[in-house]
Amino acid sequence: MKHHFSLFSFSLVLLFLHCTQTLSQSPTSAPAKAPAAASAPPPAATSSAQASPPVMVPVQVSKGPVNVIKILQKAGGFAVFIRIIKSTQEDIQIFSQLNDSRDGVTIFAPTDGAFSAIIKSGVLNSLSDHQKIELVQFHIIPRVLTTANFQTVSNPITTLAGSGSRFALNVITTENMVNVTSGLTNTSVSAIVYTDSQLAIYQVDKVLLPLDIFAPKPLAPAPAPPKPKKDDGADTPMVPKDISGAVSCVMLNTMLNTMLISGVIIVAAVFSL
């Protein structure tokens, strides 16, 4: 019994000593708590254009061909070209090409600045109505050409103005440039105004001048002198022929005949005696 009591007493002493040591510790000696994990910053706000691709607004398919005049007016900077197209009624020709043909149309549209040189010099106003029509038609190709088509197109390109050396139009492509030359004009495509499956409009900074209008035409060969015509009329003087030999022969024959007759008469008279 004493033995159990001693163990119990010893246990109480140990418990007391332990509690005293724990209470005597300062608050700073307590193990430091781990710092709270820093909260992740909120995601930066991004614009709707970066978050998702731009929304493509559906365009209603036109029931007929597009209006070239309205496209050029909306683009701006083509007032002179628009005025010439209207005055020559080539807008009707373009409409017909787009409406009646599946080949489409390609237009090289000169800017107002491109026309300034030939306006100030008076060249544009000096053109006849027919020449103005040819000038506009020289900028229109009766088929649609994309920028990729320019790399494989065959030169010279046929325009509405015609073909041949007097209306030669050549397109030459380099790495990032499309050069257009007419023999008198050398320029390049500076912008794409409009393009779809039936129509392509490209901006050029010079007016394309065809040789047929602005280059002197070769002189026609001088006509050969007319050949003299044969005229059997009385106005043509008759050259007298030399008939002296024939007259001499006739006179000689006459003399001989006279002498022969005279001889015959004499002989006949002699025998009659």
Image (tube, rainbow, N blue to C red):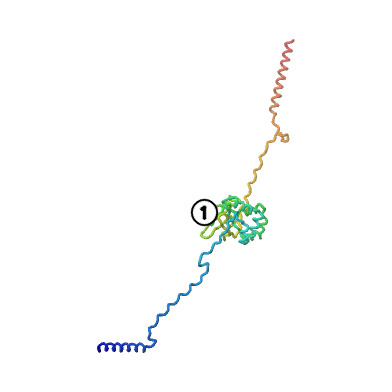
Residue 77 drawn above or below residue 98 = below
In the picture, measured across the screen, residue 34 lies left or right of residue 143, that is: left
Query: What residue is rendered at 51% in x and 71% in y?
Result: 45
The quadrant in which the N terminus is found is: bottom left
Residue 41 coordinates in the image, percent (x, y): 47, 75
The residue wearing badge 1 is 152
The amino acid at mark 1 is Thr
Residue 261 coordinates in the image, percent (x, y): 72, 17
Dot 1: few (<14), some (14–19), or many (≥20) neighbours within 10 Å?
few
Residue 185 drawn above or below residue 261 = below
Work out whether residue 44 or residue 30 is closer to the camera in this orientation and state it.
30
Residue 77 coordinates in the image, percent (x, y): 62, 61
Q: Considering the numbered disc 1 on the image, is that residue within a helix, a strand or a loop?
A: loop
Work out whether residue 226 or residue 185 is closer to the camera in this orientation and state it.
185
Farthest residue toward the top?
Answer: 273
Query: What residue is rendered at 71% in x and 20% in y?
Result: 257
